[in-house]
Amino acid sequence: MIIKFQSNFKDEKHDIAYFEKWVDKLETANGRNYQRIPIQTSLGKTHVWGLHTEDHNLEALVIFPGARSSALFWDLDKGLDNLKNKFRVFLVETNGLPNLSDGSTPDIKSLDYGHWAKEVMEKLDIDKAYVAGASFGGLICMKLAIVAPEKVKAAFLLNPGCLQPFSLSWNNLYYNILPIVSPTEKNVRKFLDKAVFCKPNHQLSEKAEQLLVDYEVFAISRYKDKTQKPYYMDKQLAHVKVPTYLLEGDKDLLFPYQKSIDNAKKHLPNLKAVKVFENVGHGIETYPDALKYLAAEISR
């Protein structure tokens, strides 16, 4: 695999220690401990968080996070409890994002992220699993489905970043760029309120939101992010033959939902269902009903 870019923390020892403390706070808030599963891949060390992974009577669910986020976002406010403990959950920290995985990344437009995801599943001894991805993670799911369809029972895309280009609307650009230019807590909260959530319907508890704000300020200010951003996969999507489910928030500024739905219907040959959640922003992985829907569809 050819390494295209290398991202890194500014002070690896200090910054990783901060991230570990952040995880400790999340574990304390949720009253549980995540299994720590480091594996070696073609992109270096890849870190995976696990829940219930020892119970092989459960279906495996492999989750990939969005850009500038951690897979642990899916469990803010104990969000994974909405899965009703029906799964062995593997939260994969994608290489190149601000987390405990190494910062090496392949060319985003190649299929190498798909080969990497297959390798991750093999290293975790997962023969076949349901996969889910939010935003950037949705692109990873589609790359995996193209490269190794035999590993995927079904793919769930949550406000994915692969069904259209990033929106160039003034509001979207302003609220996304604001915290990058000035990574203060105030500006991060503006971004979250305008783009990620849709309060009061879609929001976190005060404690969980503070954890999210702390992470975002840390990630923007401490991580040298050279990872390419997701792109519209267009005709590449026709090669995805696995059953695919699309979950959309109708208040997603980054990737407006109707265009994603239209392109999914146009390009995905095995699109099984589309679910639109009203008054839900881009951070749909933190919305309880989205995870309940995922679990219900798998249980059918």
Image: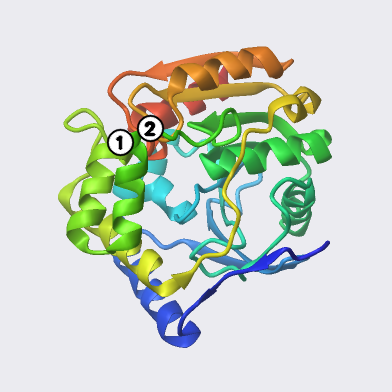
Kindly state the secondary structure of the residue where label 2 is placed.
loop
Question: Mark 2 = which residue?
Answer: 169
Q: Amino acid at mark 1?
A: Asn
Residue 191 in the image: state x and y as whole percent.
27, 47
Residue 14 in the image: state x and y as whole percent.
41, 85
Q: Residue at 50% x, 37% y: name it.
A: 166
Residue 246 in the image: state x and y as whole percent.
54, 23
Question: Mark 2 and 1 residues: CB-CB less than 8 Å, in contact?
Answer: yes
Q: Quadrant of residue 217?
A: bottom left
Residue 58 in sight here = no
User: Which one is nearer the viewer's eye here, 297 or 59?
Assistant: 297
User: Which one is nearer the viewer's eye here, 66 or 2?
Assistant: 2
Kindly state the secondary structure of the residue where label 1 is placed.
helix
Residue 201 in the image: state x and y as whole percent.
21, 28
Q: Residue at 34% x, 69% y: name it.
A: 218
Q: Amino acid at mark 2?
A: Ser
Badge 2, how many Cα within 10 Å: few under 14, some, many 20+? few
Picture colour scheme: rainbow
Tell me the tag on residue 171.
1
Q: Residue at 27% x, 45% y: name it.
A: 192
Residue 270 lies left or right of residue 15; in this view the side is right
Q: Is residue 221 above or below residue 278?
A: below
User: Which one is nearer the viewer's eye here, 78 or 109?
Assistant: 109
Q: Quadrant of the N terminus?
A: bottom right
Q: Residue at 50% x, 66% y: name it.
A: 99
User: Which one is nearer the viewer's eye here, 27 or 286?
Assistant: 286
Q: Is residue 202 above or below residue 217?
A: above
Q: Quadrant of the C terminus?
A: top right
Residue 33 lies left or right of residue 103; in this view the side is left
Q: Quadrant of residue 84?
A: top left
> Label 2 vs label 1: CA separation?
6 Å
